[in-house]
Image (tube, rainbow, N blue to C red):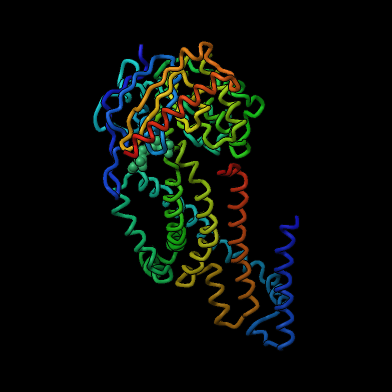
């Protein structure tokens, strides 16, 4: 219980400091509203926030699923065919150096303003951490584990499913934690470049219109979305990974 | 009939600092059902020797025969089990599922040999009641017991053990030695057992092969069959002391050979 209460205490203290600072320095509303103003904007615009949340969530979850799934498949190929890995892993590393904000317009040109391009951007953000982690996970088997499998004349398929895959699960979850929040970032970045609806769109519009209270509410909503996805990953991990390496 | 017959085996490794002759002209004949202990200075090639028998390491030269076929055939027929220095249990599998592993991989079903009951084996190694425990919930000695149960589940004809109790304290090690001897008498399996402990070698071995290093070779094969007619021996007896000092002398000779 305390483990949940303490971070809540930390968050509350910061919100209080924020409220105090706004009041003490008499900050105008359009530069930074106080927490109360944001809360009011939140409840007044609840419908609009939800309407913008849905497409962002679809893009984030879609990208999360597709990007991670693709990365796991490709890591599986890389682990089994070293030659393919030597040819394509450096290419993946190279693509990862392109900032996603620079890549997003290209994807929107190709896939249009719809959900597809948003999912693609989000998927690409998730892809690389998962690829790197899964390669490491699949290779985190020890040489005596491999020898054990060989003494039992295990096939490559059995070595993969009975040894490499379960070994990689902690690495899988490490990457899922990263992409749970990164997928939301990807979706919002795509919406900045071009979209009709979404939290990213709302953030841009409210910034330009000086509707700062709604801007803050939109930011809080996107962070809530990321927090939800992160929590689902953490809860799933505690249920699935019950073992520890000694 | 001999279970393992090795002749003229050479193994060399190429390392950054030049080639290492790990095994040189190794020859040994281990009879079926024998408990053979292997001792020798560190780095003399004991592990490499076991790995050659298990077909984990191909020899550069020489012949390895395990029962009627070569090492690879014996491995594919699942006649060989290996116990490593670390238990090497799969940490996400419970005790009983670790013991079942050999029956779930490889060609076990097509081998068509009756296996041992995993539950019975867990009892045999003294872990009855802990079937559903995960490896991290066990002590080092308990983990090694699970590894032994896992090795026995396929009723192997040859059991290779590479310092299986090397990381355990003296008391636990002696208790496991007692159990090992019982298991051997009960199963009649041919065992090749590597150790650094002279008393372990004296206690377990029916024959003790002493190796010398640089290059790794057989220095002396001591037959203890006549000394221990009943198999077991009292650790506080003077005969046990004599065997141990005899082995120590052979080991010192082997180490002396390495320096010249
Ligand atoms: N994969 C390898 N590559 C290079 N050299 C190796 C390899 N495996 C073993 N060696 C070398 O071969 C020699 C024999 O090694 P081995 O592990 O068989 O010795 P050992 O008798 O088991 O030693 P210890 O008692 O310390 O376990 C050593 O000099 C070692 O450095
Ligand atoms: Mg060794």
Question: B108 and B232: which one is in front?
Answer: B232
Give the quadrant of the N terminus of chain B: top left
Quarter holding residue B137: top right
Foreground residue among B219 and B181:
B219
Number of numbered discs overlaid on the protein picture: 0
Answer left or right for A8 relative to B10: right
Residue occupying image coordinates x 57% and y 20%: B238
Q: Is residue B96 above or below residue A14?
A: above
Q: Is residue B36 visible?
A: yes
Image quarter where the C terminus of chain B lies is: top left
Q: Is residue A49 above or below residue B17?
A: below
* Residue A228: percent from left, percent from top: 62, 58
Q: Quadrant of ligand 1?
A: top left
Residue B248 falls left or right of residue A219: left
Residue projecting furthest to the left:
B61
Is B176 above or below relative to B155? below
């Amino acid at each position: 219980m305390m483990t949940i209460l303490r971070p809540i205490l930390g968050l509350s203290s910061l919100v209080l400091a924020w409220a105090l600072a706004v009041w003490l320095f008499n900050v105008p509303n359009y530069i930074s509203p106080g927490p109360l103003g944001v809360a009011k904007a939140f409840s007044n615009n609840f419908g609009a926030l939800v309407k913008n949340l849905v497409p962002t969530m679809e893009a984030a979850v879609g990208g999360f699923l597709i990007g991670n799934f693709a990365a796991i498949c490709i890591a599986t190929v890389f682990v089994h065919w070293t030659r393919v890995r030597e040819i394509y892993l450096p290419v993946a590393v190279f693509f990862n150096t392109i900032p996603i904000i620079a890549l997003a317009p290209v994807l929107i040109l190709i896939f249009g303003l719809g959900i597809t391009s948003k999912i693609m951007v989000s998927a690409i953000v998730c892809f690389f951490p998962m690829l790197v982690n899964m390669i490491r996970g699949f290779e985190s088997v020890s040489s005596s584990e491999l020898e054990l499998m060989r003494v039992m004349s295990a096939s490559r398929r059995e070595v993969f499913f009975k040894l490499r895959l379960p070994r990689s699960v902690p690495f899988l979850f490490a990457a899922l934690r990263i992409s749970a929040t990164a997928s939301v970032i990807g979706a919002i970045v795509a919406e900045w470049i071009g979209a009709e609806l979404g939290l990213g769109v709302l953030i841009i519009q409210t910034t330009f219109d000086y509707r700062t209270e709604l801007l803050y509410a939109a930011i809080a909503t996107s962070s809530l979305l990321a927090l939800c996805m992160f929590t689902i990953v953490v809860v799933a991990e505690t249920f699935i990974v019950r073992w520890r390496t000694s | 009939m001999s279970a393992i017959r090795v002749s003229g085996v050479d193994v060399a490794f190429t390392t950054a600092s030049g080639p290492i002759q790990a095994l040189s002209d190794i020859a040994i004949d281990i009879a079926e059902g024998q408990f053979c202990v292997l001792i020798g200075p560190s780095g003399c090639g004991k592990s490499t020797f076991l790995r050659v028998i298990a077909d984990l390491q191909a020899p550069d030269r020489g012949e390895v025969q395990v029962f009627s076929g070569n090492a690879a055939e014996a491995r594919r027929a699942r006649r060989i089990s290996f116990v490593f220095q670390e238990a090497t249990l799969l940490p996400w599998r419970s005790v009983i599922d670790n013991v079942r592993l050999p029956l779930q991989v490889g060609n076990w079903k097509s081998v068509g040999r009756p296996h041992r009951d995993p539950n019975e084996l867990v009892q045999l190694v003294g872990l009855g009641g802990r079937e559903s425990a995960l490896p991290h919930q066990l002590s080092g000695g308990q983990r090694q017991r699970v590894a032994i149960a896992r090795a026995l589940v396929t009723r192997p004809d040859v059991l290779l053990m590479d310092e299986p109790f090397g990381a355990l304290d003296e008391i636990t090690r002696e208790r496991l030695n007692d159990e090992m001897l019982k298991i051997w008498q009960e199963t009649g399996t041919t065992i090749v057992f590597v150790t650094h402990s002279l008393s372990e070698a004296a206690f377990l071995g029916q024959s003790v092969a002493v190796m010398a290093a640089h290059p790794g070779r057989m220095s002396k094969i001591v037959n203890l069959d006549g000394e221990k007619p009943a198999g077991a021996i009292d650790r506080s007896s003077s005969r046990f002391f004599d065997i141990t000092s005899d082995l120590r002398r052979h080991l010192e000779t082997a180490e002396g050979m390495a320096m010249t």
